[in-house]
Image (cartoon, helix red, strand yellow):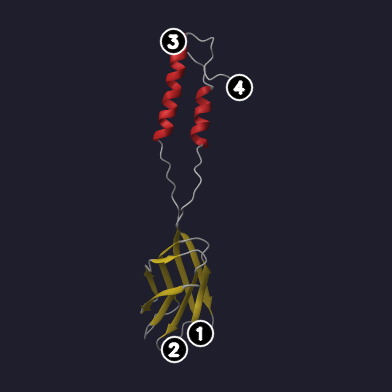
Amino acid sequence: MKKPMIDPSLTNEKKIKKLTTIVERLTRRSNKIAKAIIPPIPISNCISGEEVKGDILKYMFCCPGKVKKGGIYLNAKPESGVVIKISIDSDIGSGSVSYIITRKNLIFEPDLDVDTWNRLTVSIQANDSEKDKITEVWIGLLWIPTIKDSEVKNFLIEELDKVEENVPEE
C-alpha cells in the first residue's frame, strides 16, 4: 500500500508546513531550465611521406551539425602556395570551400553545414610541386553536432528532495 504524502497523525500546523514544503518543491521544479553544453567534436589527421598531395582526411558524419573551425600545419613554408579544399558530399549534392596557404600554418573557419551520413574530404595540392615539396601535413577540424532530440535527466533535483525529506523535523 502506498504511503500517504502527509501523515494523518500530524497536527494541523505540521500538515500545513509539509504542504508548504511540497508546493515549494513543485514550484522549484517547474521553474528549472536545464542547459547542456555540447562540446565541438575534433577531427584530425597527420600525413607524412616523400610528397604529400591529394586527400589528407576523410570523415563521415553520423548526425547533422556544422564544421566551424579548422587548422592546418605544413612542414615547410610554401613558396608558391598550397591549395586546401574542404568538400562535403552527399547522395543529393555537394559543397566545398578552398583556401590558399602561403605560410606553415593556417587557422580557418569553413562554417559548413553537414547532414547525417555526409562525407567530408580534405585535400591539398601545391601550386608548384617542384618548388613546394610537402612532406608532412597536420589537419584538425572542429564540428558541432545539432542535437534535436535529447533526454532530460532530473535525478539530481529528485535526489536532493529525497535528502531533504529524510531531515528530521524540528
Between 145 and 41, the one lying in front of the other is 145
Q: Residues within 10 Å of mark 1 (few under 14, many from 20)?
A: few
Residue carrying label 1: 51
Q: Residues within 10 Å of mark 4 (few under 14, many from 20)?
A: few
Callout 3, which amino acid? Glu
- Where's the N terminus, which quadrant? top right
Q: How many labels does the image show?
A: 4
Give the mark nearest the N terminus, 3 or 4. Answer: 4
Q: In this view, does 66 lie above or below 78?
A: above
Callout 4, which amino acid? Lys
* Residue 134 seen in the figure: yes
Distance, label 1 to label 4, CA atoms, is 75 Å
Dot 2 and dot 1 residues touching (CB under 8 Å): yes
Distance, label 3 to label 1, CA atoms, is 84 Å
Residue sticking out furthest to the front: 92
Measured as percent of width and height from the top left, residue 43 is found at 49, 65
Residue carrying label 4: 2
Between 76 and 155, the one lying in front of the other is 155
Nearest to viewer (mark 3 / mark 4): 4
Give the mark nearest the N terminus, 4 or 2. Answer: 4
The residue positioned 38% from the left and 66% from the top of the image is: 111
Distance, label 2 to label 1, CA atoms, is 9 Å
Between 137 and 13, the one lying in front of the other is 13
Residue carrying label 3: 13
Callout 2, which amino acid? Ser
Dot 3 and dot 4 residues touching (CB under 8 Å): no
Callout 1, which amino acid? Glu
Distance, label 4 to label 2, CA atoms, is 80 Å
